[in-house]
């Protein structure tokens, strides 16, 4: 096995150069140092422990939270010729014995385990008599109770230092704000370890947030215009919403599958496998889906309901465009899910300190949604990073948002909340402001209020926007003990007294989706002069055939980016083929002739 990290990078993984801080992290780990590594999804975190595990003596133990993630990573490593295996509940007893024998006899470079399996007596005894290269703790934000995906079993990992004091530990995550970082360092005993923090920016992802107004029709228009036939993930707040949305999408011709904790384990596994291994599948899911998803060609992540925090939003949207190609993070949101999420927080069994933290995180998410400035600048600033210029690749940069003086409208809305007793939601208040005289309004006598009808000149869509933005700015609060009714806050009174003006984003009512609209190409060829669509499809077909024969996802054979290089460069010899990014020594031997044959059948 080669011992030089540059040689391993090229020969094994087929990459010409390291990215960002990869080289510094790898050199530090090879030298035996502990570290905390923060890199954006798709930034190459895995190589930071895979290469040291290959170079150092012994086996590298990778703590991973999900069985499906372990399986995919092991399959990908084996394709490159790396000796990898996992220990989890899907293995038979005979398979467990074979893996344990390979570990003990030095026949593995990497072993993937779940935290609860790692601290089983049998596994600890096995590792105690084995030469170990390192411990890698993947998805390390799971160790923090203040993170967005707290996993109690990860707390056991604090014992690694006690059981194996001389083995280097590398903790890795794509998402951690400063409090979460401090918690990871404290829990894992990494106080003296350096932190390698790469930029959080994912410039290939386009961020967009639109006010919710017939969400399904809005999403359908988004798909038709940009991503019909693309792989994607759609997040919903509840299991019922997931099932209903997946069924609706299938009715529109989209190959959509549900995923949530209420489905049987076999159904979840089958649906995830189809998403990973087939092209153009859309998963509709709760947050139960997605951690560590390695699929590189996810072209969009859509949120049909509001995420609980910016950390969750960043982590979930980061599953798009891991291959570096253009991708979309698209979201619709409205006031109702703000009410629902705050009720969920209030109704949870968490302590008061945790509830206050979650409300602050939700408020930050609301503020992000209502921005009129560059979304990427605000997103990166949340994680302590500065982007000096507007990004030019978010909705607010591409289509600058107009603002309007909403002071008078805000005063009317706040007055209506007060005069109706602070007991009603935005829909009812809008009806009063618009001057409706239905039975419910008359029964409360609200048709006699001074605010009845004072907002007849503003349409319901605009009033929904006003109430939503008032909540987002803290000028109204949501009553958690009732049915989501709106209440005044201390910040309401200066506005009511005319001491403060209120400027709001001017939301534009979206147009209705047009039937039969021709979908746009989600990924136009970067250089049409060298592009051959028939060769591209033939290469994809051959890749799919090879993947099915081995029961692995197509991307572990080659990523789309490597196939694109084949189209543009048209190698004719194995030597030329070896120069393509992502073609290491093992893949060259296994697949070089196969793909050269396809290229030869399509002379340019």
Image: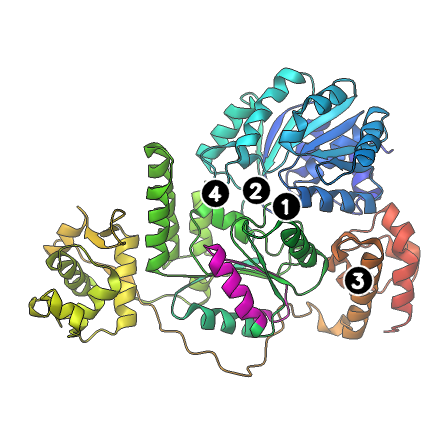
From the top left corner, tell me how far across and down residue 503 is, in percent.
25, 60
Instruction: Label 1, secondary structure: give it.
Output: loop
Q: Nearer the viewer, mark 2 or mark 3?
A: 3
Q: Give the residue at mark 1.
A: 43
Mark 3, mark 4: which one is toward the viewer? 3
The spot of residue 585 in percent (x, y) is 87, 46
Compared to residue 39, the image places residue 283 above or below, namely below
Residue 358 lies, with reference to residue 539, above or below; the image says: above
Which disc number belongs to residue 402? none
Q: Are marks 2 and 1 in contact (CB under 8 Å)?
A: yes
Cβ atoms at labels 2 and 4 below 8 Å apart:
no
> First in sequence: mark 3 or mark 4?
4
Residue named by callout 4: 385
Which residue position holds label 2? 174
Please give the range of residues in magenta.
226-250
Look at the numbered discs 2 and 3 and tell me whether their residues touch, using CB distance below 8 Å: no
Say which residue label 3 marks.
544
Neighbour tally class for label 1: few under 14, some 14-19, many 20 plus, Cα within 10 Å? many
């Amino acid at each position: 096995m080669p011992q030089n990290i540059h040689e391993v990078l090229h020969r094994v993984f087929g990459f010409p150069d390291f990215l960002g801080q990869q080289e510094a992290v790898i050199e530090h780990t090879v030298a035996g140092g502990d570290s905390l590594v923060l890199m954006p999804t798709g930034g190459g975190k895995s190589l930071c422990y895979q290469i040291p595990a290959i170079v150092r003596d012994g086996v590298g133990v990778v703590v991973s939270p999900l069985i499906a993630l372990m399986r995919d990573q092991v399959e990908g490593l084996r394709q490159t010729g790396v000796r990898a295996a996992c220990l989890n509940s899907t293995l038979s007893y005979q398979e467990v014995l074979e893996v344990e024998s390979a570990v003990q006899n030095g026949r593995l470079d990497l072993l993937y385990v779940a935290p609860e399996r790692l601290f089983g007596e049998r596994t600890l005894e096995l590792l105690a008599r084995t030469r170990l290269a390192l411990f890698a703790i993947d998805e390390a934000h799971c160790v923090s109770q203040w993170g967005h995906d707290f996993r109690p079993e990860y707390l056991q990992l604090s014992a690694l230092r006690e059981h194996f004091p001389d083995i280097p530990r590398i903790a890795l995550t794509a998402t951690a704000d400063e409090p979460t970082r401090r918690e990871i360092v404290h829990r894992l005993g990494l106080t003296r370890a350096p932190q390698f923090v790469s930029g959080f920016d994912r410039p290939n992802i386009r961020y967009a947030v639109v006010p919710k107004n017939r969400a399904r029709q809005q999403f359908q228009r988004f798909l038709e215009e940009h991503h019909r036939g693309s792989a994607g993930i759609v997040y919903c707040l509840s299991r019922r919403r997931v099932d209903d949305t997946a069924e609706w999408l299938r009715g529109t011709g989209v190959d959509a599958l549900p995923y949530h904790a209420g489905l049987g384990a076999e159904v979840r596994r089958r649906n995830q496998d189809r998403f990973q291994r087939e092209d153009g599948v859309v998963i509709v899911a709760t947050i139960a889906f997605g951690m560590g998803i390695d699929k590189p060609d996810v072209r969009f992540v859509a949120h049909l309901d509001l995420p609980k925090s910016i950390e969750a939003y960043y982590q979930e949207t980061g599953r798009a465009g891991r291959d570096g190609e253009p991708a979309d993070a698209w979201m619709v949101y409205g006031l109702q899910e703000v009410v629902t999420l705050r009720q969920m927080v209030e109704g949870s069994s968490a302590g008061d300190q945790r509830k206050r933290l979650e409300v602050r995180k939700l408020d930050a998410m609301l503020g992000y949604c209502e921005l009129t400035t560059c979304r990427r600048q605000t997103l990166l600033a949340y994680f302590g990073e500065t982007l000096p210029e507007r990004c030019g690749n978010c909705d607010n940069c591409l289509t600058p948002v107009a603002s309007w003086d909403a002071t008078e409208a805000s005063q009317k809305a706040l007055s209506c909340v007060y005069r109706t007793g602070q007991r009603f939601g935005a829909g009812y208040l809008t009806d009063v402001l618009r001057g409706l005289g239905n039975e419910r309004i008359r029964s409360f006598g609200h048709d006699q209020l001074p605010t009845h009808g004072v907002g007849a000149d503003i349409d319901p869509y605009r009033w929904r926007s006003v109430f939503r933005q008032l909540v987002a700015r803290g000028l109204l609060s949501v009553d958690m003990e009732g049915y989501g009714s709106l209440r005044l806050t201390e910040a309401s009174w200066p506005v009511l007294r005319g001491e403060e003006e209120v400027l709001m984003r001017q939301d534009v009512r979206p147009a209705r989706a047009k039937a039969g609209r021709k979908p746009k190409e989600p990924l136009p060829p970067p250089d049409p002069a060298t592009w051959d669509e028939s060769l591209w499809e033939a290469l994809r077909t051959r890749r799919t055939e090879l993947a099915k024969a081995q029961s692995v996802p197509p991307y572990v054979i080659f990523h789309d980016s490597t196939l694109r290089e084949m189209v543009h460069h048209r190698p004719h010899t194995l030597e030329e083929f070896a120069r393509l990014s992502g073609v290491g020594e093992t893949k060259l031997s296994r697949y070089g002739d196969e793909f050269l044959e396809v290229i030869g059948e399509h002379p340019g």
